[in-house]
Amino acid sequence: MPLVFSDFDMEKKAFVNPSDTVRRRKDFPQIAVSTFSGDIVEDYVKAFDPPEIARLYTANGSLPVYETEYKGEKIALFVSRVGAPACVAGLEEIIAMGAQKIVLFGCCGILNENATKGKIILPVSAIRDEGTSQYYLPPEDEIETDKNCLKAAEDFLSEFKIPYALGKVWTSDAIYRETPALIAKRKGQGCLGVEMECAASMAVARFRNIPFIQFLFGADNLDCEEYDMRDLILYGRNAGNKYLTIAFELGVRL
């Protein structure tokens, strides 16, 4: 019995395109950095007061896009909305404005505590257990990280002796349907963590031919007998400056 995702269409031009909703800007930074933590971006804005250069609009409200600078390179900094469809819509519009390289970071649920404790997680691939990526690439179980982008990230983290773990991640659309059986299956497939956007973000970057890297840090723990929320509600705020510095550095190295 055919599934709805078997209707994948290779046509590059859609009926509604990002260029129909936002305008391209000649002076838009080529590098874009984004995170899902509004607090991390807000703390940075309060500290450095970067100018606002654009906004991303949805029915939920608008999100500012700021311009900052790192090592002489202009960088667009913005918050991505949680969930694959909303995240990808924002990435599409940022690319349409003029971004040519993207770094995205955020937290994930840990599926392998021993392999990830105290480490940055670099996805080598993501299991496409969500719907958005199915509209950008033909149906496959996984999508691999761009090898050049992954090497750039590994080289930087190794150079500065920042501990990291390489492995798969599980991109899911349903945070409250991560059942024990599915968790065990994904762990068996080599997944280090579970999140909601990586597969879709890599898919849109590949579709638009944009260098893209995402890194993750552990928040809540699913590698235990009972769910451990840990510091999930902080969403990485305590180490926000560290994560932003990593993201900016990766942006100039991609």
Image (cartoon, rainbow, N blue to C red):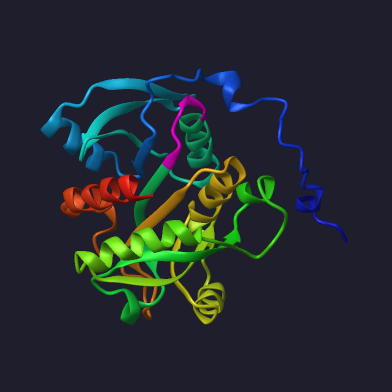
Please tell me which residue lies in front, 152 or 32: 152
Q: Which range is magenta? A: 96-101
What residue is drawn where x is 60% and y is 19%? 20
Residue 3 on image: x %, y % = 80, 56
Q: Residue furthest right?
A: 1
Q: Indicate whether 129 appears above or below 13.
A: below
Q: Say if 206 sits above or below 67 in the image.
A: below
Q: Is residue 141 above or below residue 60?
A: below
In the image: residue 66, left or right of residue 133:
left
What residue appears at the point 35 percent right and 60 percent down from the top-left corner? 153
Side (left or right) of 137 relative to 158: right
Quadrant of the frame with the N terminus: bottom right
Q: Residue at x 32, y 20 (%)?
A: 53
Residue closest to the eye, 68 or 219: 68
| Picture coordinates of residue 235, whole percent (x, y) | 28, 52
Image-quadrant location for residue 192: bottom left
- Is 59 situated left or right of 2 in this image? left
- Residue 110 picture location, percent across and down: 37, 69
Q: Residue at x 51, y 43 (%)?
A: 210
Among the 4 quarters of the image, the one containing residue 18: top right
- On screen, residue 41 versus residue 15, left or right, reads left
Q: Position of residue 95 (x, y in %)?
A: 49, 33
Residue 111 drawn in magenta? no
Q: How many marks?
A: 0
Residue 123 vs residue 210, the one in the foreground: 210
Q: Is 98 inside the magenta-drawn segment?
A: yes
